[in-house]
Amino acid sequence: MKKVISLLLTALMAFSVLTVGAVSASAAEETAPALAAGSHIFFDNTNTQWTDVYFYAWNYGYFGDSVPMNQIGDTAVYEIVVPQDVPNGAEYFLFKSAADWSGQQTPNQTVETGMNTYTPVFDEAGAMTVVKSNTIDAPTTEVAITPYSKTFTGSIDVTVYAFNTGDTTATYQIGDAEPVAFTEPTTITLTSTATVTVTAGTATTSCTFTKIEDAVITADAGDYTGDIYVYTYGGDRVAPGFEKMTFDAANNEYKYTINGSAHVIFTTTNNWGTAKKFLIYDEDDVLLEDQEPFIASGQAVTYFLELSA
């Protein structure tokens, strides 16, 4: 009887080991990134024939950045290094033909395990779809900087990367300062305009970060003393959104500082489902033709607000 029990326990233990092994393997597969840091995303320009190709991304190291992609030799294929691991299914980028929005662009793109190449194709009506495929991606020495060449106020955190360096020493350099060696992704804080250069062997890249002044808004809403929110979009906003203005009771006015530049809309709440807009007048009590005015960095403006009907 003891022998039977012993055999049974052995079988159960073996089953347990197999089960745990299967779960662990499954978990490893689920957590493995679809694109590993240091790998590439490729764009096939055969059908689009754009003069330049830009990678526009808003996550995984990037913050609303338009990064020029590198053409591979004389081919129609362009590449960009992935600075951070990206999970399967992540939608965080698109491709476009200009650094701004004056050109063409693809729809938003997702990452899919086993796929690293994106090729736009067009139907007879000219509608674009993007086909994914896989390109063999042999490890090469790569460097990257995120975010990519931005304006900022106050300070900005910049991260430098180097991949597959082997025996090569990777360095970053701020302006004309001495290069600093690094082995892991390293974040540096800039408080003034500077160019950052990263080098590893023959791989090199540079980004310039330009410090700009805040824009300051003063608003006079007459007898209104409730909350006023300012909705900012465009300009150098990373993402649009609402912010509450500060009320100065002594001067009966509202204040808000924009870290850079943006279009503005003034509302009563921070929810478009309940918000009422304010009409915007200038100091001569003239209704502004543009009710979503653009305020540039460094500007100090005063607006007179009145609730719309």
Image (cartoon, helix red, strand yellow):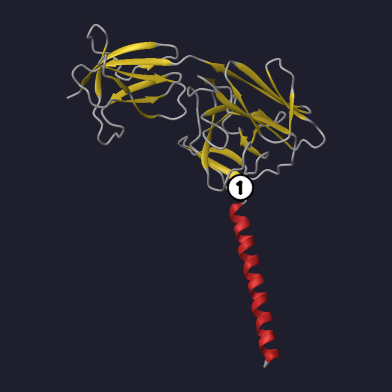
Q: Is residue 51 above or below residue 297?
A: below
**Amino acid type indicated by mark 1:** Ala
Picture coordinates of residue 72, whole percent (x, y): 70, 31
Which quadrant would residue 223 be assigned to in this image? top left
Considering the numbered disc 1 on the image, is that residue within a helix, a strand or a loop?
A: loop
At label 1, counting other C-alpha atoms closer than 10 Å, the crowd grade (few under 14, some 14-19, many 20 or more) is many
In the displayed structure, 204 sits above or below 131; it is above
Q: In which quarter of the image is residue 208?
A: top right
Q: Quadrant of the C terminus?
A: top left
Residue lying at 71% horizontally and 44% vertically, measured from the top left: 136
Pick out the residue farthest to the top.
Answer: 284
Q: Nearer the viewer, residue 21 or 234?
A: 21
Residue 183 horizontal side relative to residue 220, left or right = right
Q: Which residue is drawn at 24% across and 22% down?
A: 278
309 to the left or right of 118: left
The reply, left or right, for residue 47 in relation to residue 288 is right
Please identify the quadrant where the N terminus is shown: bottom right
Front-lying residue, 123 or 278: 278
Residue hosting label 1:
34
Look at 63% across and 67% down and name the residue there.
20
| Outermost residue, right side | 167
